[in-house]
Amino acid sequence: MHGMTLVQVERLARLAHAAQVDKAGRPYTEHLAAVAGGVAGRGGSYEQIAAAWLHDAIEDGVLSEEWLAGADLPQSVKDMILALTKRPGEPLEEYTARILVTPGALLVKGADLAHNADPRRLAVLHPSTRDRLTAKYAYVRSLLGLTTPG
């Protein structure tokens, strides 16, 4: 077995992010569930689905890098989570380059971007925020070589 099961990983992610909401005021766990579902729907592995559930946990400060280092997860999952963790002030070019060299991470980021760019999600945001994010997501997709939003 891989250590933590996906049920355990999901439970942990839901607990860790329980107090968070997204830019539209929705529970942040909805985003995590959508990304994990997107990864599964793209044929993702156990490791990629686990990374999807935890892809924002370090970046959002709800779990620590120390916790991750000791977690009962395969090293490949830890590597993906760290690759997907954007550092404060880190250029998008460096962030995306790290994703591209980390096995499995691109599929997870693709599912993340697809949900972030969902028109139904963007529709509730202020137009200036929506425009800024749409441009950012398009730029990140281009850096990753992902040509379509889906």
Image (cartoon, grey):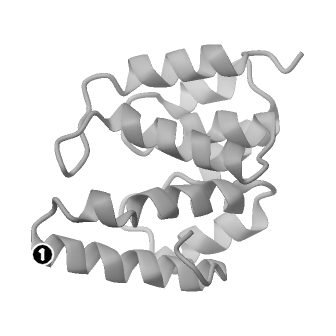
Would you place residue 28 above or below residue 101 in this image?
A: above
Q: How many marks?
A: 1
* Residue 119: quadrant of the picture: bottom left
Residue at the right extreme of this rendering = 1
* Residue 106: quadrant of the picture: bottom right
- x and y, in percent, of residue 72 in the image: 73, 18
Q: Secondary structure at mark 1?
A: helix
| Residue 14 left/right relative to 43 | left
- Can residue 61 be seen by looking at this rendering? no
Picture residue at 60% right of the left edge, 49% below the top: 38
Picture residue at 44% right of the left edge, 68% below the top: 90
- Can residue 143 be seen by looking at this rendering? yes
Q: Nearer the viewer, residue 81 or 40?
A: 40
Picture residue at 37% right of the left edge, 59% below the top: 88
Alpha-carbon neighbours of circle 1 within 10 Å: few (<14), some, or many (≥20)? few
Would you place residue 74 above or below residue 109 in this image?
A: above
Q: Nearer the viewer, residue 54 or 71?
A: 54
* Residue 84: quadrant of the picture: bottom right
| Residue 131 left/right relative to 63 | left
| Residue 6 left/right relative to 119 | right
Quarter of the figure with the C terminus: bottom right
Would you place residue 77 above or below residue 24 in this image?
A: above
Q: Which residue is mark 1?
A: 127
What is the three-letter code of the residue carrying label 1? Answer: Pro
- x and y, in percent, of residue 36 in the image: 59, 40
Q: Nearer the viewer, residue 32 or 121?
A: 121
- x and y, in percent, of residue 43 in the image: 79, 49
Quarter of the figure with the N terminus: top right
Q: Nearer the viewer, residue 123 or 60?
A: 123
Picture residue at 32% right of the left edge, 22% below the top: 18
- x and y, in percent, of residue 41 in the image: 69, 48
